[in-house]
Amino acid sequence: MVHEKNLDQFETMSDLVRELGVQEWDIDVPCPAGRWFRDGKRKELLRDMSEKIRHAYGGGYHGGSSGLACGSHLMTVGPDGAAAKCGFYLDEPAGNVGDGVSKAWRRMKHVPLSDLDCDCDELDQCAGGCRFRAEVLEGSDLSPDIVQCYARGVK
């Protein structure tokens, strides 16, 4: 996880992870919410943190599958059994595992990449990024995930 206190450590960490032979290194940026992002300094910090994603390699958990955006390949189950496409959506569960995992999975909203409001050449690489972050920062779950845009030099 990238944060304000480790921004200057990613080159060293990258060398270490590769030296250790790590097969996949996923890096993420915290999902800002509320007033955190309204401050101009925070927007700059978010951009700086996003650029560190470039050090990641070997896959990534924000990816989708078969032309679908993030959330199409995973499901989070909360302590109460609520099933959602990720932990950020537990307040909008698709079902409850007590009623059956496959039933909850079928009720999950899967977003086709073609429905996203993204117009760039990087969509296949970022797979739309995080739908929750797009909604929080840009106002719609169909908006671009600006963290992925920043990481790829699109914004």
Image (cartoon, rainbow, N blue to C red):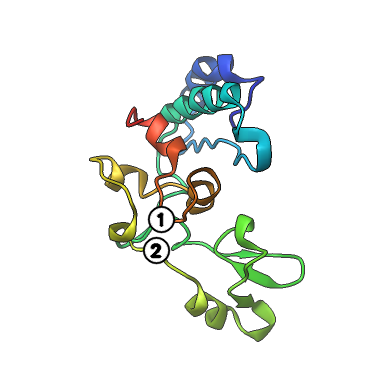
Query: Residue 8 location in percent, x, y?
Result: 57, 14
Mark 2 vs mark 1: give the one in front.
1
Q: Quick check: 36 above or below 4?
A: below
Compared across the picture, whether 126 is left or right of 34 comes to left
Horizontal side of 106 relative to 144 (left or right) equals right
Mark 2 lies on residue: 111
Amino acid type, mark 2: Val
Mark 2 surroundings: few (<14), some (14-19) or many (≥20) residues within 10 A: some
Is label 1 in a helix, a strand or a loop? Answer: loop
Question: Where in the figure is residue 27, as x and y percent of width and height?
Answer: 52, 35
* Cβ atoms under marks 2 and 1 closer than 8 Å: yes
Earlier in the chain: of badge 2 and badge 1, it is 2
- Tell which of 43 and 47 is nearer to you: 43
Image location of residue 109, percent across then percent down:
47, 70
> Which residue shows up at 56% across the image and 35% down it?
29
Along the horizontal axis of the image, is 32 left or right of 67?
right
Q: Return the x and y of residue 95 as percentages of the image width and height.
A: 62, 77
Tell me the crowding category of disc 1: few under 14, some 14 to 19, or many 20 or more residues within 10 angstroms, Cα based.
many
The residue where tag 1 is placed is 142
Q: What amino acid type should be assigned to the residue bearing mark 1?
A: Leu
| Residue 54 sits above or below residue 26 on the image | above
Residue drawn at point x = 67 percent, y = 42 percent: 34
